[in-house]
Image (cartoon, helix red, strand yellow):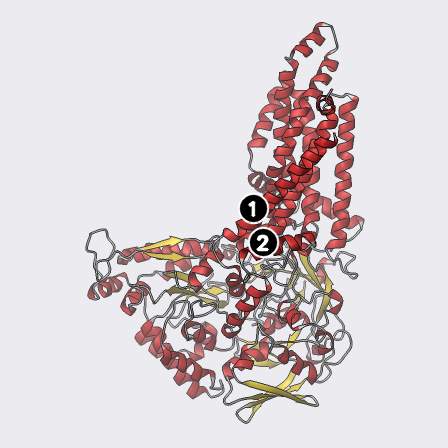
Amino acid sequence: MKWYLARKLLLYLLTFVVAVTIDWAIPRLMPGDPVSGLIARLQADPTAAQEMHGYYTESFGLDEPLWRQYLNFWLGLFHGDLGPSIAYVGSRVTDLIKTAIPYTLALLVPAIVLSYIAGNRVGAMAARRKVLDNTALPVSYVLTATPYMWLALVLAYIFAFRWQVFPVSGAYDFALQPEWSWEFAKSFLYHWTLPFLTLFLVSFGGWAIGMRNLIIYELEADYANYLQDLGAPNRLVRRYAYRNAVLPQMSGLALALGAVVGGALVTEIVFGYPGVGSLIITAIQNRDYFLLQGIFLFIILGVLIANFIVDIAYVIVDPRTRTGLQGS
Amino acid sequence: MSSRKTRRVGVVGLVASLVSLAVAASLMASGAGAGPQAAFAVPRNDTLYTSGKQWGPYTNFNPLKPDYNTGIVGLVYETLFRYDPLKDRFIPWLASNGKWSGRSKYVVTVRNGVKWSDGKPLTAADVKFTFETQKNTGAQYGTMWKTGLSRITTRGRTVTFHFRGVPNYQEWDSNRYTVPIVPRHIFRSYSARELVTGNASNTRRIVGTGPFRYGGGAGSSQTLQWTRRDGWWANAIGYRMPMRYIVDIHNTSNTASLQNFLQSRIDLSNNFFPGINRHVGRGVGTYYNRAPYMLAANTAWLVPNTTKKPLNDVNFRRALAESIDVNRIVVADYQRIVSKANPTGLLPTWSRWIDQAQVRRLGFSFSIARARSRLASNGYRDRNGDGFVEDKDGATINLRLIVPKGWSDWETAIQIIADSAKDAGIKITPAYPDFNALVEERNTGKFELVINNEKQIGNTPYTYYDYLFRMPILASQTVSNFHRFSSARTWSLAQQLNKIQSTNVAQAKRVHSAIQRVILQQLPAIPLWYNGMWAQYNTRYWSNFPTSTGNQATPSTWNGYLNMTGIDALAKLRKK
C-alpha cells in the first residue's frame, strides 16, 4: 500500500509539473502583446501611453528573458503568489480567484456528486426493466449529448425569460450583498438552481447510460447466472452486479471531471454567474498570462486531487486491488 | 439497488455535497468583501439600478487610475469643474471659480464649505497634492507636467498653476474636469507605484467629497452598492440625490442584461442593445424619442494604413470613402440608433467649430459612380475582368478590413462596407481577429484597414486632431495616428490650436478650418458614423430621465460621463 501510494504520488507530481509548464507556456504562445492591449483599453493620453507601456511591461516582469519568467513563476507559486493580473491591473490573481472560486465550487461539487449518485441509481434501475429502460434511456441519451451551453440557454429561455420563475442572471438578488442570513441563503439557492440543473442533467444522462449498460453486462456474467440458478433473489443478484459495475464508473468519474469543469465555465457565462467562468473569458481576451495561469492551475490541482481521491477510493472499494497490493 | 452499501454511498455523497456547499458559502462570505453596512436588502423604490459600465470585478477604487469602478469619479471623488458638452460650458464644482491670470497662470478658488466624507475640510493643499501625483511615471494625466505646467502654489483657498511659455489651453481645459481631487490626508500614504497602478481598495479609506459612500460589493463580479451620504456640499446649491442607493450591475451577456432591463431589474442601462428602438415608448425611454434615439459619444472611423499601397494614394482613399454606403449601416445594422458622421468626423456637440461651407465644398459623399470614375481616372482599372480594380502597376488589390472578434455590430458593418465597395470595384475582405491580436496589428502598422472609435466626446475637437495627426510616428502607435499619416504642417496647426483659448473664437475658428481642410482633402481616416452614448431608461420606478426636450444631460454612468452632466441626470430623477 505504501509503495502504491508513493508511486502514485510521484506520478501525480510529475503530471503536475508537466501540466503547469504547459499552462505557463500556452498563454504566451498567443499572438498579441498584453500590455498594448491594456494601454488601448485604459485610453491613456498619448504621452502617458508611451511611458505606461514601459512601466507596465517592467512591473509585470515581461521584460525579462523567458527562462527567468518561468523561474519567477515557480518561485511565486511556492510563495502562494500567482502574480499580478494584467486585465484587472492592480489586483492580485490570488485575490480574484479567491472571490470567484466559491461560486464555481458551489456549482461543481454538488453537480458532480449528485449526478453521479442519481445517474448510477437510475441507470441500474433501468437495466432489464422494459418500461423504465424505454423511457430513461432515450432521455439520458438526449441529455448526455446536449452541450452544456445549449441546455443552459434552453433552461434560461424557458424558466427565466418565458415563465419568469427563475432569475436570468447572477448568484444572488441585486438588492443584496453576500452575508450570513436566511434571506441571502434563500436568494443564493434560488439563483443557483438553473445553473446547477444544467450541469446536473447533462452529467446525469452520461452516468445513467453507463450504469445501465454495465449492469446488463454484469447480469450476464457467469457469477450472476450461477447465483440465479441457485435461486438467489433478484435483489441480491442485482446488488452484486451493482458492486461490480460501480468500479468502471469510478474510473469514468476521474475521466469526466475535466469535461464537467469545462461545462461549468460555459454555464456560468450563460447565467452571468460570478465564478471563474467569466474571469477566464476576460483573461483570454486580454492575454492575461497570470490570471490564465492561475485559473488553470486551480483546475489542474482540482482534477489531480479528485483523481487521487478516486484512486484511493478504488483501492478501498475493490478488494482485488487491495489484495493485489498486499501481494497475496 | 437498495442495499445498505449503496444507501451508505448515497448518504455520504449527500453529506459531502452539503459540506462543500457550506464551505463554499463561508468562503464566499469572507471573500466577497461584504461591507459592514451591507447587511440588508436595499428597498426597490429607493434604489437606482444601473448597468453597462463594468465588465470586470469591482476591484479598482483608485480614481487616479483609469478603468475605475462605476461611480468612483462623480459619485465619490469629484473634479474641480464639470463640463456640459450639450451646452458647451464648464460648471464650477469643487472650484467655486477659475480663471487665467495673465497668459501663463491659472488661478482656482477652492469652494468653501466642502467636506470629505470623514469630516475633514477640502483644502487647497488637497488640490495641489492631487495634481502633483501626476508627476509620477506612468500617471494617467502626466502629460500636463511634460508640456508646460511647471509648479503649483497655494495661498488660502486659492491654487495657482504656473506654466512655462504659452500653456496648452485646450488640453488644460480637459484636465479641469477630468482630474479627480483626492484627499491628501489619505492618499499621501500611498506609494507612487500604488497611486499609478494600485487599486486603493481598502474600503474604509474610500473618502470622497461626492454624494455617495461605499455600501458593499468590493471585489465581487455581481453588484457594487453606493449609499447616499449626508452633508454633501452641493445640497447647499440646490442638488439633492433622490435615491438612497445606487446599485451598479456587472455586465454579463448582452442578452442577460437586456432581460434584466426589460424585467425592470435595471433602471438606467448603458449597454448596447440592438433593436431597443422597438421598445421605446412602451415603458422604455431614450434621449431622443425617434432616430437616432441616442446622443453621439464618439466617431467610428475607417482607418486606412497610409503607408501601404494603394492606401497611400489620396485619390484611392477618396474613392474608397465615396464607395461606402453608410446609410445602409445606419439602417440595416443599427436600426437607426446611430447617425451618419459629418465628413470632418467631428461630433455634433462641436458643430460650432465645424466650417460647414468648407464641408459642403470639399466633403465626400456616397456615390458609386463617382468612386468608379475617380478610380478609372487615376489608373485603377480592372485589367483581368474579375470585377475588381487592380493597382496602377497591375498588382491585385485585396484589402483586409479588421474589427475585433465578437463586436457583432461592427462585424456586420464591415460586411456592408465590403459589399458596398465591391460595387465600385474595390475588393475588401472582412476579418475578425481577437482584440489583442488586432491591437498588435494596428499599433505596429501591419494592418491595411481597421475600424476604430477610441476618441470620446469632450470639451475640444483638439483630441480628435491629436488622434488624426499626432507626430512623430513611432514603431508602435499606442493611442493615436494608427493610420500613420505624416504631415508635420498639420501637426503644427493642431499644436497651434492647443495654445489658443476657446474664448478666442475667431482665431480658433481659423485654425479649426485649416485643419478640417486637411481632413476633408487628405482623408487621413474616413469618418463613418457616430456611435451612441447608449442609454435606455426603464421608467417603472424612476422618471424624469434626460431627454432632448426636457432635462438635457449626459445619461451615462460610463467613466468620464458623471463628471460631465451625469450627476445632473441622477439628481433630477424622480421617484414614481
Residue pointed to by mark 1: A22
Depth check, front residue: B351 or B220:
B220
Q: Secondary structure at mark 2?
A: helix
The label nearer to you, 2 versus 1, is: 2
Displayed quadrant of residue B564: bottom right
Q: Secondary structure at mark 1?
A: helix
Q: Amino acid at mark 1?
A: Ile
Q: Is B530 placed above or below B403 here? A: below
Q: Is B109 placed above or below A176 here? A: below
Chain-order first, disc 2 or disc 1: 1
Q: Residue B426, can we see it?
A: yes
Depth check, front residue: B200 or B250:
B200
- Residue A138, image x, y percentages: 58, 25
Depth check, front residue: B552 or A196:
A196
Q: Is residue B522 left or right of residue B273?
A: left
Circle 1 chain: A
Q: Is residue B497 left or right of residue A12?
A: left
Residue pointed to by mark 2: A70
